[in-house]
Image (cartoon, rainbow, N blue to C red):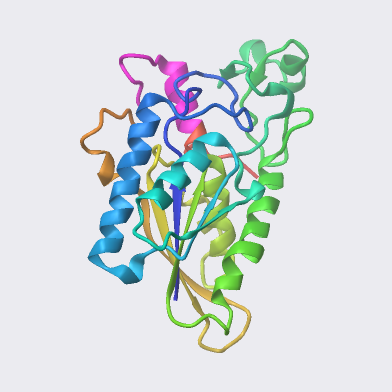
Amino acid sequence: MLTVTLVRHGESEDNPKAIWAGWKDAPLSQLGRRQAAAVGAFFRAHTLANPAHKPHTIYASPLLRARETGQAIRDSQPHPKPEFVVNPDLREQYFGIAEGHPWTYQRPDGKSAEQLISEGIYPVLFERHEKFPEGESSDDLRIRTDRVVRECIVPHLGKDVAGDRHIVMASHGLCIAELVASVIKLDPSWPVGSDDTYRGMLNTAWARLEIDPHEDGGSSYKVRVTHFNEGGHLKDLDVPTASEPDPETDDTANAEARAFFSGGLKVEN
């Protein structure tokens, strides 16, 4: 059996701001570093309690906020340290010319997205094929996460792999939502529409999937989602939820942006 644990990065310096921040490469905030340390301590305790749970490989997005989170998990592990692999396909969705600009949920005055973009206003795009100029759509992001499954997950399920294995992937809210959907596609028994079930992750929350080769020996697999948006390691930190404003820094727009970048706002087909 292969266990895949997906971890969203700690809070970045951009997360409290209502701006488009996909590939915009802000580092972890002070809170984000505390969150990364907390999730690292959680995984260390997990390994010490049962050495079989020690990650074999830790994959991470190259963007600072996710790479630093993945590195914190690796650094927390006893020797020998897990292999650490940076994979650009684990980056967040790229928002093109909108990167760094204010984020808005509403489309004022009934204007189209194209009209607003021409005026320098960058609204949420609600259909999966839509994207900002030079950016990626949700469908484009799914192509990347499908590739992660083929190149980083399925090889750990090969016949030459002895025994059970655990891998960790440090990534981003929207990317993780698409990645869970990509993994679920390995198992044809999942009902249609299941790929939209698992959305919305707190900073450094984790999800876990278990994958077994199918009993018939074919190319499909049995996939179970055993945990999602687990944040027990954050209980002693002052952490805002993905959908409620932080009373110190957030207004409603910032709270909506937090929910969006957590992967919690559904984009339609």
Q: Position of residue 172 (x, y in %)?
A: 52, 41
* Residue 4 in the image: above or below residue 11: below
Which quarter of the figure has residue 248? Answer: top left
Locate residue 192 relative to residue 223 in the image: left or right: right
* Residue 9 in the image: above or below residue 250: below
* Residue 223 in the image: above or below residue 233: below
Which residues make up the magenta segment?
244-260
Whether residue 94 is visible here, answered yes or no, is yes
For the C terminus, the quadrant is top right
- As for residue 253 lying within the magenta part, the answer is yes
User: In the image, what residue occupies the spot 34% across and 59% down?
Assistant: 78
Whether residue 263 is visible here, answered yes or no, is no
Locate residue 85 relative to residue 229 in the image: left or right: right
User: In the image, what residue occupies the spot 42% across and 36% down?
Assistant: 10
Q: Residue furthest bottom?
A: 216
Nearest to the observer: residue 128 or residue 93: 93
- As for residue 255 lying within the magenta part, the answer is yes
Nearest to the observer: residue 2 or residue 85: 85
Locate residue 97 relative to residue 75 in the image: left or right: right
User: In the image, what residue occupies the spot 49% across and 18% down?
Assistant: 17
Q: Residue furthest front?
A: 79
Q: Position of residue 205 (x, y in %)?
A: 37, 44
Q: Position of residue 155 (x, y in %)?
A: 61, 72
* Residue 23 in the image: above or below residue 107: below
For the N terminus, the quadrant is bottom left
Q: Residue furthest left?
A: 236
Q: How many marks?
A: 0
Q: Position of residue 22 (x, y in %)?
A: 61, 32
Which quarter of the figure has residue 166? Answer: bottom left
Which quarter of the figure has residue 53? Answer: bottom left
